[in-house]
Amino acid sequence: MKNKDHIDHEVQKTLESLDNMERAKTDAFFYSRVQSKLQHETLQTASSPGLGFAFSVAAVILIIILNISTILIGSTVSGEDAQSSSNYPAETFEEYRVFDLNYYNQLEDN
C-alpha cells in the first residue's frame, strides 16, 4: 500500500509541474519561415526526380537486355551442342563422384 501511495504522490507532483508551464514563444515571422521552407522543399523534390529514378530505369533496361541476349544465345545452340554440353559436368568431375549414379537404375530393374 505504501508503494501505491508513493506512486500517486509522484504522479501528482508531475501533474502540478505541468500546470506551471508556459506556452513556447517564438518571434513574429517563425510560422512564415517554416511555411516557406516546407514549400521550397516540396517544389524542389517535385521538380527533380533525382538519381534514384534514373538508376532504377537503367537497371530495368539492363536486365531486359541481358534477358534478351540470353534467350538469343540459348536459341542458337544446336541439338548436338546442347546434348554434349549437358554431359560436360558429369564427365569432368567423374573422379570426384561419391556414389554410383546408376544406383536408382539398378533399383528400377529389380
Image: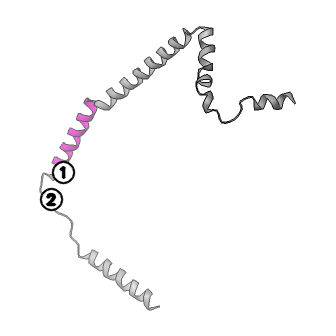
| Towards the viewer: 60 or 14 | 60
Q: CA distance from mark 2 to mark 1?
A: 9 Å
Q: Does residue 87 appear left or right of residue 107 in this picture?
A: left
Instruction: Identify the residue shown where x is 16% and y is 47%.
Output: 33
Q: Quadrant of the C terminus?
A: top right
**Residue at x 71% of width, y 32% of height:** 100
Q: Quadrant of residue 92?
A: top right
Whether label 2 touches label 1, CB < 8 Å = yes
Residue 67: say if magenta: no
Q: Residue at x 50, y 17 (%)?
A: 70
Residue in front for this viewpoint, 1 or 67: 67
Q: Which residues are magenta?
A: 33-49
Q: Callout 1 environment at 10 Å: few (<14), some (14 to 19), or many (20+)?
A: few
35, above or below 20, in the image: above
The residue at 19%/48% (across/down) is 34
Amino acid under disc 2: Thr
- The colour scheme of the drawn protein is one colour
Q: How many marks?
A: 2
**Residue 99: x percent and y percent?**
69, 35
Q: Earlier in the sequence, mark 2 or mark 1?
A: 2
**Residue under label 2:** 26
Residue 61 appears in the rendering: yes
- What is the chief secondary structure element of the magenta stretch? helix
Give how far across and how far down residue 21 sits, in percent.
Answer: 23, 72
Q: Quadrant of residue 7?
A: bottom left
Answer above or below: position of 83 versus 96: above
In-image side of 77 versus 102 (left or right): left
Amino acid under label 1? Answer: Tyr
Residue 65, above or below 23? above
User: SS at mark 2?
Assistant: loop
Name the residue carrying label 1: 31
